[in-house]
Image (cartoon, rainbow, N blue to C red):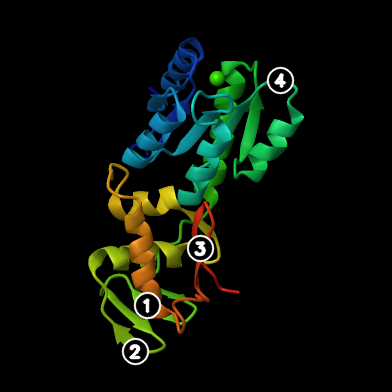
Amino acid sequence: MKTDVAAGEGPILVVEDEPTISEAMRYALEREGFRVETAADGRQALHRFRANPPMLVLLDLMLPEMAGLDVCRIIRSESIVPILMVTAKDAESDKIVSLEMGADDYITKPFSMLELVSRIRAHLRRASMVETAPEPSVLTAGPVKMDTQAHRVWVRGESVSLPPKEFALLASLMRGAGRLMTRDALIGQVWGHDYFGDTRTLDVHVKRLREKIEENPHDPRYLKTVRGLGYKFDLT
Ligand code: CA
């Protein structure tokens, strides 16, 4: 067991539907001292990713059911974890789209396990050099100020009280201010990924938040709907 891998930093999540490749990766990575979790499809990948946040995701582009690119996009909307895409030989467009979807890098099949391990180490070194600033307890976006520790919200200077789920939803939208937050990401962050209730619940909560934040809730300036995808706390 090597000692240069810090304990408690989360596993490497290997998302690969071909068991022989997946097992070969697990073997190579565990031999290097990494903890490894595997997922054989996109849904399982998102489940594992949310249940046990990994320190790096190794993501096969060609997956059954949910495409690797969609998995990449959803993970990126929820986390800054390094994502290394595994792409097929010669598919130049896949590489470009992977990077556009938020992957940090790609590795082309076939590759040696030695190459894979050295790429992973390079990404983890880079990730550990990025100072992880503690999350500020006071968030500000548009007319809204929130103290996440004191659980208080002000809109245009006026104190507003919010039920817990509305508070959590607003916090998620404010943390991602200026960016699209997918429906999956918001539901995952506010209700948990095991939530099987009515997905309209999200829309109802957004509607209530609009009534408290927007000057005109029917023509929202801040809590914008991104049709078919999710919501965005717009700062423009
Ligand atoms: Ca595959």
Q: Nearer the viewer, mark 4 or mark 3?
A: 3
Residue 137 in view (yes/no):
no
Disc 3 marks a residue whose amino acid type is Thr
For the residues labelled 3 and 1, the Cα–Cα distance comes to 14 Å
Residue 95 in view (yes/no):
yes
Q: Compared with residue 39, is residue 102 higher up or lower down, i.e. above or below?
A: below
The residue carrying mark 4 is 89
Q: Residue at x 50, y 14 (%)?
A: 18
Q: Which of marks 4 and 3 is nearer the N terminus?
A: 4
For the residues labelled 3 and 2, the Cα–Cα distance comes to 25 Å
The residue carrying mark 2 is 158
Q: Residue at x 55, y 61 (%)?
A: 179
Disc 1 marks a residue whose amino acid type is Glu
Disc 2 marks a residue whose amino acid type is Glu
The yes-or-no answer for disc 1 within 8 Å of ligand 1 is no
Q: Which of marks 3 and 1 is nearer the N terminus?
A: 1
Q: Camera-side residue: 29 or 154?
A: 154
Give yes or no for contact between labels 1 and 2 (Cβ–Cβ under 8 Å). Answer: no
Q: At numbered mark 4, what does the secondary structure look like: helix, strand or loop?
A: loop
Q: At numbered mark 1, what does the secondary structure look like: helix, strand or loop?
A: helix
The residue carrying mark 1 is 211
Point out the image quarter for the N terminus: top left
Q: Which of marks 1 and 4 is nearer the N terminus?
A: 4
The residue carrying mark 3 is 225
Give yes or no for contact between labels 2 and 4 (Cβ–Cβ under 8 Å). Answer: no
